[in-house]
Image (cartoon, rainbow, N blue to C red):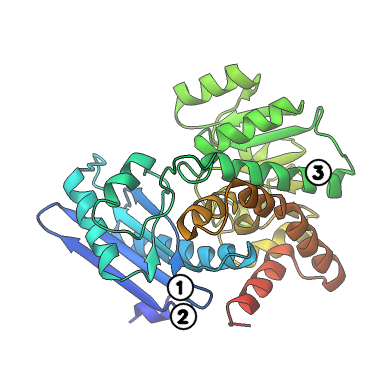
Amino acid sequence: MTTLWDRPNFDDHEAIHFVTDAASGLKAIIAMHSTHLGPAAGGTRFWHYADDDDAVTDVLRLSRGMSYKNAMAGLPLGGGKAVILADENRTKTPEMLAAFGRAVDRLGGNYVTAEDVGMSVENMIAIAGTTDYVAGLPVEGEGDVGGDPGPHTAKGVFLGLKAAVKRKLERDDLSGVHVAIQGAGSVASHLARHLADEGARLSIADVAEDRVAALAKETGAAIVDPADILFLDADVVSPCALGAILSEETIAKLNTGIIAGAANNQLARPEDGQRLAARDILYAPDYVINAGGIINVSTEYLDDGGYELVRQRIAAIPGRLDQIWEESASSGRDPAAVADAMAKRLIGRA
């Protein structure tokens, strides 16, 4: 019989909390992968899962990714994540959010939550009504610090994507560079605007037809069927939706030289990093390139600097990617494996 500890994604998590509040209907999981560098920090995802097992797998993968992301971003934070298991109707009530806040509060600051997929700044404000351990709240008079992490995540991805284009295509500009973006949500939309401003040629896909149509009209992008977006003949494919989309099957069908996007856990399995390398596809490890959001909200939460520090930390993302790619080239290991090894050293798990 397979136990929780035997799961491939368990990876020595320090704690996993299963939360139930019958009065509000709340079912949630809070996972803390590492507190080696500080409190486990990571967002709360509101999602309808096919079954509870999928929710456990998701929260474990996301939590470990936050340990690596925060460490590689140079933040004094460990890694954690939470998922609220939504029903089929995506019912979300003030009572449910208050109950979740109380669950976070019982952990005494060992876990710090923030916005993630399916949650909003308004939701985080509601959760903050029952706990102080919330990052990403709007801050008066601090420029763009706090609030929606999406624009900051997109800025880091944009800078990392430019670094990948420079390395792979030997281009300092993006004029005419074809970027295929999977997703048209907050991060993908901000990324598309950055790319359009620099003259990139865009193709975009999203299951939300109205949202993708509006973004395409704004940026001049071509609209592509969601089933086809990963496999376009494009200079860059930018996954900005959900994870586990780069597998043995999909990698074999890619027609790009660069993968650089905002989605978490893009690789379905660790060996998929080597599969990308074998096809000479330059991969920007997701938790390195998409760290802009946690950089912003953690700066607000830790109160260790204003927006200038946020800018400096996000601006360091391309240099971190270059370091990974250089070590990959010299060692023969794929970039994902190099990044994992670096992160493990930083959290004391070399």
Check disc 2 and report the residue beneath it: 12
Instruction: Work out which residue is located at the far top of the displayed protein and give it.
Output: 217
Whether label 1 touches label 3, CB < 8 Å: no
What is the secondary structure assignment of the residue under circle 2? loop
Q: Is 82 left or right of 169, judged from the image as shown?
A: left
The quadrant of the picture occupied by the N terminus is bottom left
Between 162 and 101, the one nearer to me in the picture: 101
Q: Which of marks 3 and 2 is nearer the N terminus?
A: 2
Image x and y of residue 157, in percent: 65, 45
Q: What residue type is labelled 2?
A: Asp
Report crowding for label 2: few under 14, some 14 to 19, many 20 or more residues within 10 A (C-alpha).
Answer: some
Residue at 28% from the left image edge and 58% from the top image edge: 131
Q: Nearer the viewer, residue 166 or 307?
A: 307
Name the residue type under label 1: His
- x, y percentage for residue 221? 65, 23
| Disc 3 residue type (three-letter) | Val
In the picture of the structure, the residue carrying the numbered disc 3 is 165
- The residue tagged 1 is 33
Q: Are marks 2 and 1 in contact (CB under 8 Å)?
A: yes
Q: Is residue 77 left or right of residue 89?
A: right
